[in-house]
Image (cartoon, coloured by chain):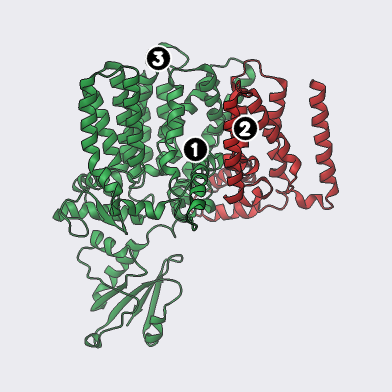
Chain colours: A green, B red
Amino acid sequence: MNKILLTSIIILAAFLRLFNLGLLPPHLTGDELSLGYNAYSILKDGVDQHGKPYPLWFEAYGEYKLPVYVYSTVVSLALFGNNNFAIRFPAALSGIGSVFVLYFIVKNLIGHSSKNNRIAALPLLSAFIFAISPWHVQLSRLALESVEALFLFLLACFFCLLFFKKSNLLFLICSCVFFILSAYTYNSYRILSPLILGMLFFVCINNKKITQQQLFVSGILSFFLFLPVLFFSFSKAGMARFATASAFSSVQSSGVLSYLLYPIIFIRNFLSYFSLSFLFTFQKENFENISYYISSDFGLLFHWQLVFLIVGIVVLLSSRVSFSKLLFVLLFLIPIPAALTISPHPLRVLPLMPVLSIIIAMGILFFAKQTSFIFRIFFGILMCAAIGETMLFAHMYVTHYPNLNEALWGSSKRIVEEAVVQEKNYSFIVVNKNTMSEENLTAKLYAPNLHLKFVNDNWTKPQEWNTKKVLYIYNGKIPKPWFKKHVEDVFLHTLNRDIVAQFWEI
Amino acid sequence: MKQNFFVIFIAHAVVFIAFVLLIKEVPSTLLFSSSTLQLHITDLIHNDAVVPLQLVRLFHNKGVVFLFDFLNRYLAYANPLFIADTLGIVGLVGFFLGLYYFFLQKNKSFFSIFLLSYIILLPLCRVFLLLSSPFFLLPYYIFSGWGYYSTKESSSKKMFFVLLFLVILSIIWFLFAKNKFSYLQSFDYI
């Protein structure tokens, strides 16, 4: 019975993550484009977009991307060809895999208690909550490293639990490797994974679960595997991302005052991750720079899960379930790296979702076991609300999300498509690179035969081109002074009512 | 003892009602009477050009929009930052201690149930009315204090130093942190 239910949950998770993946969300974001192009370039020529052969760190938009997602996209592009689906597939697959792994993690967590009727259904229920979570579903449908990193992180936790159960060195090594691999996948895990790994070793030594030989082998292996990412993290390139995303970059003052402000900023950011507004409403206007990850009007969790979340926490606090401490420690540790950056951010605390799924599942189980009439009525109402809200979410995601976020999605693909159509009418197509940063990669990825010339704001038409027709593409609502020099030029049209790409014939 | 609580409750209610009555234009303080509910529905429907009418009505009606609007406004108060900005870090820690001991208590005291239910119901005033009053903060302070009172080590030296540290942190918090989430301004946040 469990196998059938688990298979159904996995099929549901796969459907939610793979259905119309290439077109929903409708276009690639800048980050997706960069990852996709680097993977395409590696597959085609064995070099990244800057010509470096098989690099470990990929330079993109003034920062460096970690390698695991790019290299997994290489496999995906080789299998499915050059399209949006292939670029997003590794994240979607990781999302499905995470649901599967979470089931086994919870199964191992409850261990011998699994025969206890009260929590026997916990693994399936946790996996189900995780499979339908709007937070995880939406992020799994984008080419995001954090989703893949979460999968690796969960795998590491799973092997860690297996090691605790069977004391087999192989499981410990697997756990260490996956923890380290997650640090090579997404920036938050560069802090979180060593933190958890350190905690794991501490618990092992404290409980005498590990022999000296096992400790030596796994410790040395972890250290050497982590060394490159450690050096990278303290290098200028590795700090580039932190410099842009750091929560402390806004601190103007220096000296003692800044030392007073740092802990305050950190605590504020840390607390923001436990705000129910963040978890349940995620209003677009409060998270303007990242709102395209999440459908408008919906939070990271469903509203109906609030009751179960509170009840789950109370049950964990009061019933002293064997793994409750572990869940609370994880709830505390996961937002720590994220709190160092501009917060709250749904990607950086994605590992909270599996923990919250288990807590919500505990709450649901508590309700389901109640025999009181009032409880049953309330439970029934909540279940009806659950069905209604899930349907509403599906409607909002499929119908509203692509429209409402149209302005935020990269319009670069449509601009490139337009350029391909216009190419035959012009001798040169010139693109203003100061206002259109993504078109270069988009053109290379989707229209490798298209010849675009990227120029700065102060570019003017060369003398030798005087007799030739040139198409100038510019992105921006207010024309720059450049256009004053070219009043005689013909304004052709704009593309997209929100992101205005202006096409000029000069 | 219970009578005392009822006296506090009634006194609080009287003050609140007096506060409401003192405002000349009560209807204008009703949030949802002047809200943009209809506008929100129109905005939502605008995106549903290709969706069957029955589905549009099922998903985007006054009930659903009101419910979501209400929940979003209410949940703005379940924000640790709001409590920290209102009570300081020292108050926030006391508040969490209060919650912790409340859920651990097997025989929950009337006082704690009364206070917590008060705190749960109190934001409703702000959700439905455009009112603000310093009286609203009182239960939060009492509950936070009760949290400290419930700790076993409340009289020890260790506790004194922890409190001292938290008070210093709270002073720094109030001096330097942006008071964006404070109770009296929380409507802006919503």
Question: To which residue does mark 1 refer?
Answer: A301
Q: Is any atom of residue A382 visible in this view?
A: yes
- Real-space CA distance between mark 1 and mark 3, rounded to the nearest whole angstrom: 27 Å
Task: Please say if A82 is above or below A485.
Answer: above
Q: In the visual, does B177 lie left or right of A259?
A: right
Contact? badges 1 and 3 (CB < 8 Å)? no
Q: In the visual, does A325 lie left or right of A94?
A: right
Quarter holding the N terminus of chain A is: top left
Question: To which residue does mark 3 refer?
Answer: A114
Residue A436 appears at what percent x and percent y? 35, 67
For discs 2 and 1, the disc positioned in front in the rendered view: 2
Q: In the visual, does B147 lie left or right of A162?
A: right
Q: Residues within 10 Å of mark 1 (few under 14, many from 20)?
A: many
Question: To which residue does mark 2 refer?
Answer: B95
- The mark found on residue B184 in the picture is none
Q: Amino acid at mark 2?
A: Phe
Contact? badges 3 and 2 (CB < 8 Å)? no
Local SS, label 1: loop
Quarter holding the C terminus of chain A is: bottom left
Q: For mark 1, name the chain.
A: A
Q: For mark 2, name the chain.
A: B
- Real-space CA distance between mark 2 and mark 1, rounded to the nearest whole angstrom: 24 Å
- Real-space CA distance between mark 3 and mark 2, rounded to the nearest whole angstrom: 35 Å
Q: Is any atom of residue A7 visible in this view?
A: no
Residue A311 appears at what percent x and percent y? 56, 25
Name the residue: 16% across, 51% down. Answer: A54
Nearer to the camera, A298 or A290: A290
Q: Amino acid at mark 3?
A: Ser
Residue A266 appears at what percent x and percent y? 48, 44
